[in-house]
Image (cartoon, grey):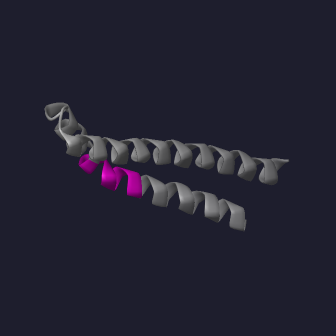
Amino acid sequence: MDLLLWITIGFIIIGFAILTSMKKGMESKVTFIKANIESKESSTIAKSVIWWIWSTTAWGIVSMFLVVWCFHNQFG
């Protein structure tokens, strides 16, 4: 198999494992933010949740790019 295929599979599996392991923590942070809207600490926690959302989005976009690139190299 091609090295690009292994990189793509590894990136997707490792990223998915990291995201699912962090999911429960992010859910508890969102619950804390909802309960303590006026707290100064909730602003800091909200920033970490927003960064997690951005990094999840970036991981998804890069994963899609790698899959398309892998198919292009295999069949193109």
**In the drawing, does residue 14 fall left or right of residue 44?**
right
Secondary structure mostly seen in magenta is: helix
Residue drawn at (63%, 63%), measured in percent from left and top? 7
Image coordinates of residue 63 in percent, x first then y, are 59, 49
Quick check: 66 above or below 2? above
**In the drawing, does residue 56 fall left or right of residue 22?**
right
Image coordinates of residue 56 in percent, x first then y, are 47, 45
Residue drawn at (39%, 57%), measured in percent from left and top? 18
Residue drawn at (70%, 62%), measured in percent from left and top? 4
Out of 57 and 40, give the one closest to the viewer.
Answer: 40
Quick check: 45 above or below 18? above
Question: Over which residues does the magenta segment extend?
Answer: 18-25
Image coordinates of residue 39 in percent, x first then y, are 18, 38
Residue ranking furthest to the left:
35
Query: In the picture, which quadrant includes the N terminus?
Result: bottom right
Out of 10 and 53, give the one closest to the viewer.
Answer: 53
Q: Would residue 2 be visible to someone looking at this image? A: yes
Quick check: 68 above or below 21? above
Image coordinates of residue 10 in percent, x first then y, are 55, 62
